[in-house]
Amino acid sequence: MRLDQLRLLFEAGDLLAAEIVTAPLEPGPVPRWCCQFRRRNGARVSLDLNRKHQGADQVRIFNSLDAAFSACRAVGFQAATITER
């Protein structure tokens, strides 16, 4: 989901938690990160890029934890859980 959609869900009380996880299948020795959010119905949604890539949504990948946490704060969260997989 895009940032503006996630912000609306947060303001409506539909997003319960933010989690920053290591991005799967990203090459390199330094981990890269993505943001996932847990909805009230138990589903997990991820933060996507604003533009579609070849007609499909693409998950936004961050190079640093600070950038990923800033995105979680932009949604409205004050805290986020960090998980390395």
Image (spheres, helix red, strand yellow):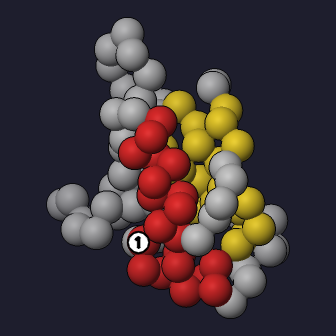
Q: Nearer the viewer, residue 34 or 55?
A: 34
In the image, farthest residue toward the front: 78
65 sits to left or right of 40? left
Residue on which disc 1 sits = 2
Element assignment for label 1: loop
Looking at the image, residue 85 lies above or below residue 21: above
Residue type at mark 1: give it. Answer: Arg
Identify the residue at horizontal 77%, vertical 68% (top origin).
16
Instruction: Measuring from the top left, give residue 75's x and y in whole percent.
Output: 53, 70
Instruction: Measuring from the top left, give residue 69's x and y in whole percent.
Output: 51, 48
In the image, farthest residue toward the bottom: 12
Identify the residue at horizontal 47%, vertical 36% (top origin).
65
Q: How many marks?
A: 1
Asked where in the image residue 77 lies, by quadrant, the reply is bottom right
Does the rendering let one see residue 46?
A: no
Instruction: Measuring from the top left, give residue 80's x and y in whole percent.
Output: 67, 49
Q: Nearer the viewer, residue 70 or 1?
A: 70
Q: Nearer the viewer, residue 72 or 56?
A: 72
Identify the residue at horizontal 37%, vertical 41% (top origin).
62
In the image, farthest residue toward the top: 29
Instruction: Measuring from the top left, give residue 83's x and y in whole percent.
Output: 67, 32
In the image, farthest residue toward the left: 54
